[in-house]
Image (spheres, rainbow, N blue to C red):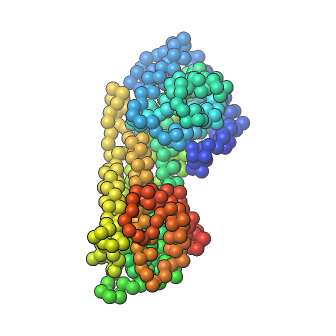
Amino acid sequence: MVVGTSGVTASDVLAVARDGARIELSDEAVAALAAAREIVDALAAKPEPVYGVSTGFGALATRHISPELRAQLQRNIVRSHAAGMGPRVEREVVRALMFLRLKTVCSGHTGVRPEVAQTMADILNAGITPVVHEYGSLGCSGDLAPLSHCALTLMGEGDAEGPDGVVRPAGELLAEAGIAPVELREKEGLALLNGTDGMLGMLVMALADLETLYKSADVTAALSLEALLGTDKVLAPELHAIRPHPGQGASAANMLAVLKGSELTGHHQDGAPRVQDAYSVRCAPQVAGAGRDTLAHARTVAERELASAVDNPVVLPDGRVESNGNFHGAPVAYVLDFLAIAAADLGSIAERRTDRLLDKNRSHGLPPFLADDAGVDSGLMIAQYTQAALVSEMKRLAVPASADSIPSSAMQEDHVSMGWSAARKLRTAVDNLTRIVAIELYAATRAIELREGLTPAPASQAVIEAVRAAGVQGPGPDRFLAPDLEAADAFVRGGHVVTAVEPVTGPLA
């Protein structure tokens, strides 16, 4: 992975955060770093105070710092700002955070020396991951505490996780890897802390996970429609063309592709005829489609932020060093919250379909709770309770963090984004949505297998065969259910719902 002066891609972030891709600095980046540093050094030599170079920080920016104290100033800002508390955040989040900070450093707008950037790359390449805590960022001035814990590792201080997964003093890990700790100079401590990198990294990873989850949810919705003997006529392209939301059309097309060739669809007029299927079935493309369009908007915001150089102050091409407010996380925070709302609604509609499959009064001939011997067996009754509990939490997580603000730094930082908090709760929401979709998958595949004498669609059959091969058992007497649900969760989490159907349907939208 070669890091230059321009923005990186979402794929780059995923490669470094999740796959451990190695990093190199381009010659262009090294030259830009050196040029910007010359500007900072020249300003540092002048008697006039320059914020971040020869002054204190935040509400303490009025104090001019003499040259002999400036190295101490940079060390102190890192040490004092590394004030996080709570559980450790995930390794992939920290790697994304560090990589995105390195991306901005290499832009040539921060005034950091080339050797600092190289040390950041060396630490990532060595598999050393700073210990970063859950709480400490208000999302303005960026993710200060999380980034400070990373900068502390550059200085050889604090704790970090080694490539073996063991947490040890950072100085020991750097020494073993042959990496010299950094002695920070003017502006460098501040430049390592002042960015939206944590919330952006989590947004990029959530977008990747949700893209797969939305495709998986289209498949499970199609399976539920099939198991409920519903009609696929509502998925016709001409119906969705007259309400041309792109996501809605894509979801309907995915469902229609999965249901092609099914003998179970179209029986809604049999027995007790239904004029229409319930909303949770009939409106599946509208709900999932709105979520897909939200994903598209969030992806646009992420791409803009990936192309940005977020720091304060910044070194401009004409040599000026100017203060700014680009570290405010509002653009990222909003879409993180939008995604949590969309994910909660997708989980909610999936749970309603599951409940319909289990209710003998609404399932159109399926046994109560899909039990083998109802009364003796409880079937999937409590699996739906678990799903309902997850949906309830999803609704709590949908309350927007970005609607809140709490003043800090003696009212200098009097309006903040809470973007880090929005990102943390979205990660939980994505985990919960995965479990909710897994429970619908578990119920729908069992229900289809209980429809004896009717052949499911080839794509549906492919999913059923794949999920059974993955250790998720089919219909039968009651058994210890948690392992089945765990196996279904792993199946969805690994993207296997999509890979199971695409050989039959072609690539899903």
The residue nearer to you, when weighing 78 against 317, is 78
Instruction: Give above or below for 335 relative to 134.
Output: below
Name the residue: 57% across, 69% down.
502
Q: Residue furthest right?
A: 27
Horizontally, residue 175 falls left or right of residue 211, namely right
Percent coordinates x, y for residue 261 in the rendering: 52, 82
Residue 109 seen in the current view: no
The residue nearer to you, when weighing 402 against 468, is 468
Name the residue: 49% across, 32% down.
131
Place residue 32 in its image quadrant: top right
Q: Name the quarter where the N terminus is drawn.
A: top right
Residue 99 seen in the current view: yes
Horizontally, residue 488 falls left or right of residue 380, namely right
The residue nearer to you, when weighing 444 against 477, is 477
Horizontally, residue 494 falls left or right of residue 57, namely right
Name the residue: 34% across, 67% down.
379
Query: Total number of numbered labels?
Result: 0
Percent coordinates x, y for residue 304 in the rendering: 53, 49
Instruction: Give above or below for 38 relative to 208.
Output: above
The residue nearer to you, when weighing 334 against 509, is 509
Name the residue: 53% across, 42% down.
92
Percent coordinates x, y for residue 71 in the rendering: 54, 17
Percent coordinates x, y for residue 67 in the rendering: 54, 13
